[in-house]
Image: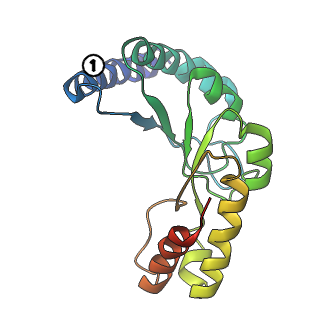
Amino acid sequence: EDLAFAMIEQHNKYRLEYALKVLEAGGGRIHELMGGGDYGAQEGLLISKNMFNKFFRPLYKKFYSEIKKNFDVEIFFHCCGSVVDLIPDLIELGVTILDPIQTSARGMEISSLKNNYGNKLNFHGAIDIQQFLPNATEEEVRIEVKKVISILGKDGGYMLAPGHAIQADTPIGNIIAMYDEANRIKL
């Protein structure tokens, strides 16, 4: 346990030093800092909340407070899977953007996320790449984009994106339809 914590702490120290140098070099032109970790699987967390709180929470708290003390940036947190149980903790730590909103994972329903956290968190993702985007028709993609934007984008706080990296099995027409439809929507 001591070795694991020391390794995580050393990694965090390096990441913080690197992030501070990058933000300083950006001279105020960088508006968000991406980080995170994949703590979720399809049905729940990969590690317990107790383990997250013991090993990672103190380091994220230190990391994000140091960043926010020195720079006015949004904290963009990448965390795949069912992470609904961590969302209140992430918000408390200073996360302002959650990515990728994997809608096929347990508890990651967009209306629930928007209702529960939409006033504290921005959302990035939510177009499923596992089953939907590779298998839908272009028209179905357009309908889904409208639906997702109408829910997560209501009153702001949503950036349209796939639920992770688009895979090779996704038809090009579906990718074009996704972004084209988003461009057509007037908010």
Q: How far across and how far down the image is residue 47, in percent? A: 62, 36
The residue lying toward the viewer, choosing from 158 and 113, is: 158
Residue drawn at (67%, 32%) of the image? 120
Please determine whether, in this image, residue 76 is positioned above or below residue 56: below
Q: Identify the image quadrant of residue 27.
A: top left
Kindly tell me whether residue 96 is visible in this rendering: yes
Q: Residues within 10 Å of mark 1 (few under 14, many from 20)?
A: few
Kindly tell me whether residue 104 is visible in this rendering: no
Q: How far across and how far down the image is residue 99, in percent? A: 54, 47
The residue lying toward the viewer, choosing from 20 and 135, is: 20
Q: Identify the image quadrant of residue 19.
A: top left
Q: In the rendered view of the protein, which quadrant contains the C terminus?
A: bottom right
Can you name the residue that lies furthest to the left here?
A: 25
Q: How far across and how far down the image is residue 7, in percent? A: 37, 22
Residue drawn at (56%, 76%) of the image? 133
Q: How far across and how far down the image is residue 179, in percent? A: 48, 71
The residue that mark 1 highlights is 17
Please determine whether, in this image, residue 47 is positioned above or below residue 129: above
| Type of the residue with mark 1 | Glu
Residue drawn at (61%, 52%) of the image? 101
The residue lying toward the viewer, choosing from 75 and 18, is: 75
| Image-based side of 95 in relation to 69, left or right | right
Count of picture labels: 1
Residue drawn at (71%, 40%) of the image? 118
Please determine whether, in this image, residue 74 is positioned above or below residue 103: above
Can you name the residue that lies furthest to the front here?
A: 186
| Image-based side of 49 in relation to 60, left or right | right
What's the image's color scheme? rainbow
Disc 1 is placed on an element classified as helix
